[in-house]
Image: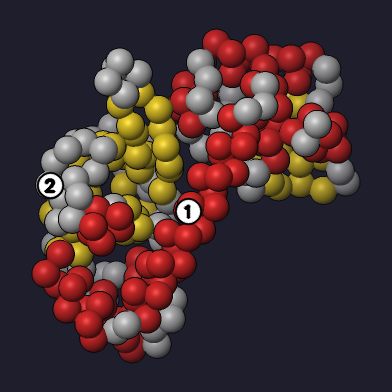
Amino acid sequence: MRALPVLDQPHDTCVRRVPIFARLSPDQQDAVGSFARPVALAAGELLHRAGEPVGQLFVVHTGSVKLVHTAPSGRTQIVRVAGPGEAVDEHAFLTGQRPNHHVEAVEDSRLCVFDHAVLAKLLATYPGISVGMMRTLSERLADAERRLALSALDVPARVAGYLLGLPAEGSDGTYRVRLPLAKKDIASWLATTPESFSRALARLERDGIVAVERDVVTLRDPDALDALANR
């Protein structure tokens, strides 16, 4: 993790995109941004390991990072992928507990870092940040519940639901989505194996529901995907 030089207004996009700072005025957001410390991660570089004391709140400015939990058996699973504007390690900040996951850069990324002491003062000065943090954590809990329900489905249904949840481009009933992660990482996020994920994707392609070209998936029959995901 490399510290970056501080420039004039380097955190404008970082802070103003973040839901936990959304209740602040633009001037207040700029004031908050002045306390952030910019850092850079290369693809594959760790922000921190599981069990390490953090004492910081991280906000993704550009790129993306993945939160990975390792079970006692050694099996790993991606629990979340955070992109621009999303915060990481709010739970550790609020509770003082050490995170049970490691955070790794999916691609070259830049983050804004708020030290614990600084953020504690900001929370006292701007109570709206606390409200934003609680709202974000509530939304994350709802997302975890949706993922738990998804895990009860068979793998093709999980893959169908995942594809439908990605940002899509296109028209005339045909849409394209770009896989944001390596297929092995998507399989981990869906709580399955890379082999099962590949078989499910191949089945959807064989049935004419999707077409796959590298990391781009064309949704030829979104209605069929929806029926599969909600059966």
Separation of residues labelled 2 and 1 (CA atoms): 22 Å
* SS for dot 1: helix
- N-terminal label among 2 and 1: 2
Q: Position of residue 140 (x, y in %)?
A: 47, 53
Query: Can the viewer see residue 193 in this picture?
Result: yes
Viewer-nearest residue: 226 or 31: 226
Q: Is residue 172 above or below residue 95?
A: above
Q: Is residue 196 left or right of residue 55?
A: right
Instruction: Tell me which corner region of the image, top left, top right, bottom left or bottom right, holds residue 17.
Output: bottom left
Q: Is residue 50 above or below residue 64?
A: above
Q: Is residue 23 left or right of residue 67?
A: right
Q: Position of residue 86 (x, y in %)?
A: 40, 57
| Callout 2–callout 1 Cβ contact below 8 Å | no
* SS for dot 2: loop
In the image, what residue occupies the spot 59% across and 24% down? 214
Q: Residues within 10 Å of mark 2 (few under 14, many from 20)?
A: some
Query: Can the viewer see residue 220 in this picture?
Result: no
Q: Position of residue 162 (x, y in %)?
A: 63, 36
Quadrant of the rendering where the N terminus is positioned: top left
- Residue to which mark 2 is pinned: 53
Type of the residue with mark 1? Arg
In the image, what residue occupies the spot 76% across and 46% down? 170
- Residue to which mark 1 is pinned: 140
In the image, what residue occupies the spot 33% across and 32% down? 69
